C-alpha cells in the first residue's frame, strides 16, 4: 500500500528587527503541527496526520495526503451536491469552532476539503496562533448577531454549500458565535463527531 504525504518546511523569517511581523504575518510549519495536536486533543479528527520530520537536512511538517478530495471552491464551481452519511452543516460548525479556537486567520475555500464520502478535512494552518489579536476568518453563512449580513451557519442545508466567500468576524461576533455554539449546539457538534467516526477513523497514524 502506497501512502502519500506533503512536506512543509516553510518558516518565514522577517529578521530579528521585525519580530512582531514575524509572529503575526509569517507562515510557519510549526503551526501546522500545533493545529494537528489541538485537533486530536479535542477529538475532532479533522486535520490529517501531521508529524515533525527532517528531510535532506531540513526540518518540517510531514502531512498525510488526502486522495480524491474536492475543495469547497471546486464543489461550488462544479455545482457538486454533497450526499454523504454525515450532514455537512454540523461539520462546518465544527470547522468554525476549531478555527476560532486556534485563531486561524487563513481559512479559505481551497483549504477545506471533502473526501469521497463527504467527510470534511482541514489543511493549511501555517498562519494560525498569531501573537496579536486578529479576527479569525471563517467559512460562514447565514447571520450572526454582530456580524455582517453574510454571517451565519455554513451550508443552509445538506444539499447546500458553504458561503461563496470568507468573512473576518469581529471579536464580538466571534465571541458570540463561540458562546452560542457552546450553549445551543454542543449536542449537535457531539453528534457530528460521532457520525464522522461511524465509518471508522478518517486516517490511520501511518506517519507516526
Image (spheres, rainbow, N blue to C red):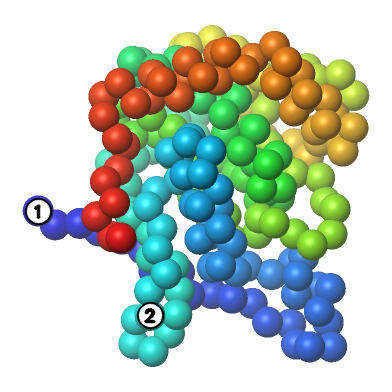
Q: Nearer the viewer, residue 14 or 190?
A: 190
- Up the image or down, 188 lies above or below 32; here it is above
Q: Secondary structure at mark 1?
A: loop
Q: Are marks 1 and 2 in contact (CB under 8 Å)?
A: no
**Lateral position of residue 154 relative to residue 74, left or right:** right
The image position of residue 111, as x and y in percent, is 51, 46
SS at circle 2:
strand
Q: Is residue 162 left or right of residue 207?
A: right
- Residue 189: x %, y % from top left: 55, 20
The circle drawn on residue 1 is 1
Question: Residue under circle 2?
Answer: 54
Q: Position of residue 38 (x, y in %)?
A: 55, 48
Q: Give the mark, 1 or 2, whose residue is nearer the N terminus.
A: 1
Find the distance from the CA under tag 1 to the CA under tag 2. 23 Å
Above or below 179: residue 19:
below
In-front residue for pair 90/112: 90
Amino acid at each position: 500500500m502506497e501512502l502519500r504525504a506533503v512536506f512543509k518546511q516553510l518558516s518565514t523569517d522577517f529578521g530579528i528587527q521585525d519580530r512582531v511581523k514575524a509572529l503575526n504575518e509569517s507562515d510557519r510549519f510549526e503551526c501546522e503541527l500545533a493545529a494537528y495536536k489541538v485537533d486530536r486533543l479535542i477529538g475532532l479528527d479533522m486535520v490529517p496526520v501531521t508529524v515533525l520530520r527532517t528531510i535532506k537536512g531540513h526540518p518540517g511538517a510531514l502531512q498525510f495526503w488526502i486522495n480524491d478530495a474536492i475543495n469547497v471552491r471546486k464543489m461550488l464551481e462544479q455545482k457538486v451536491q454533497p450526499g454523504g452519511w454525515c450532514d455537512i452543516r454540523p461539520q462546518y460548525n465544527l470547522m468554525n469552532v476549531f478555527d476560532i479556537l486556534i485563531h486561524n486567520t487563513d481559512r479559505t475555500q481551497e483549504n477545506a476539503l471533502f473526501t469521497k464520502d463527504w467527510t470534511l478535512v482541514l489543511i493549511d494552518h501555517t498562519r494560525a496562533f498569531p501573537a496579536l489579536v486578529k479576527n479569525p476568518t471563517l467559512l460562514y453563512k447565514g447571520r450572526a448577531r454582530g456580524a455582517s449580513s453574510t454571517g451565519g451557519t455554513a451550508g443552509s442545508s445538506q444539499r447546500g454549500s458553504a458561503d461563496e466567500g470568507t468573512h473576518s468576524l469581529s471579536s464580538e461576533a466571534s465571541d458570540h458565535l463561540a458562546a452560542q455554539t457552546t450553549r445551543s449546539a454542543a449536542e449537535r457538534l457531539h453528534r457530528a463527531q460521532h457520525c464522522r467516526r461511524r465509518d471508522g477513523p478518517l486516517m490511520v497514524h501511518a506517519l507516526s
